[in-house]
Image: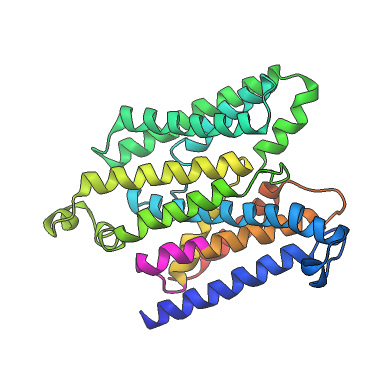
Amino acid sequence: MKSGKKLLLALTLVAAASMTLALMSGSVKIGWQAIAGSGLDHELLLHLRLPRAVNAFTTGALLALAGTLMQVLLRNPLADPYVLGISGGAAVAALCAMLLGLESTGTSIGAFLGAMLSMLLVFGLSGFERYSRLLLTGIVIASGWGALITLILAVAPEGELRGMLFWLMGNLDNSSPPYPGLIALILGLMLSLPLSRDLNILARGNLVASSLGVPVNRLQFSIYLICALLTSVAVMTAGSIGFVGLIVPHGLRRLGGHDHRILLPGAALLGGSLLLLADTLARTVVAPQQLPAGAIMALIGVPLFLYLLRRKP
């Protein structure tokens, strides 16, 4: 446990450094004096960079936390928040809201409702009788959402198409308020951390968990509900961003974070830092032009995941 506390401390320092870098970097360089000032730099820091940095951190933390829970739920190292079609349902509903001309608030609400609908479909059609059935149902539904996304893009007006594509690639440049992500992250940690002991046992298998008195069915449903909430808020905030929920749990387990009392908060810290760094690169690589944070995250995630796979456990 002592080594776990050291790991959490190190991840907290990484998160603080990532946040500092994000706030100071951009097409316009800003110093610390801007925090206490009252000029243009102060406005830029507090009203543009800070909300975006908080959104990037909370989105990454939500996805990493959901990915950690999903890998325990399915006992599959390739599981991530998007494997059961949650993001696909959110994307379809959000794109429909864009076609109807709704503002960003309507798009966010649509994304949340779409994610909840996808969760109900997967759970209603498969239940938790077998992991393979749940996984296959999610993959099929995700494929169906993907086909609907293609049809929506095919009939979308050209004026709306660029915004839709940027949203699908993961876009944090939408000035969303940071409060939903912060509230969802705090709520997700409050709901999942008390389950840490049961999650440690569930990772050994349903039979072992049942024999030790863990209410397996109720625990599985709770995990899926928490994952759906976390993923839907993440998609609502930043669109579709992959790899965070996949690689962060792998990386932490390589560092010795097998206990979910350490793994869950560690995943939130590392996932938030990773996406925050990706978004900082998206804002600065070709500044003042901005790139989709999801595309940068994929460019980081692919080689990083391949490296983790090649390393011996």
Percent coordinates x, y for residue 1 in the rendering: 35, 79
Residue at 63% across, 44% down: 238
The foreground one among 307 and 153 is 153
Q: Is residue 45 left or right of residue 201?
A: right
Q: Is residue 127 left or right of residue 66?
A: left
The foreground one among 57 and 161 is 57
Region of the chain picked out in magenta, as a range: 255-268
Percent coordinates x, y for residue 236 in the rendering: 58, 39
Rendered view: 145 above or below 1:
above
Rendered view: 240 above or below 48:
above
Q: Main secondary structure of the magenta part?
A: helix
Percent coordinates x, y for residue 216 in the rendering: 21, 49
The foreground one among 66 and 206 is 66
Q: Kindly indicate the quadrant of the structure image that contains residue 25.
A: bottom right
| 178 drawn magenta | no
Q: Is residue 245 visible?
A: no
| 263 drawn magenta | yes
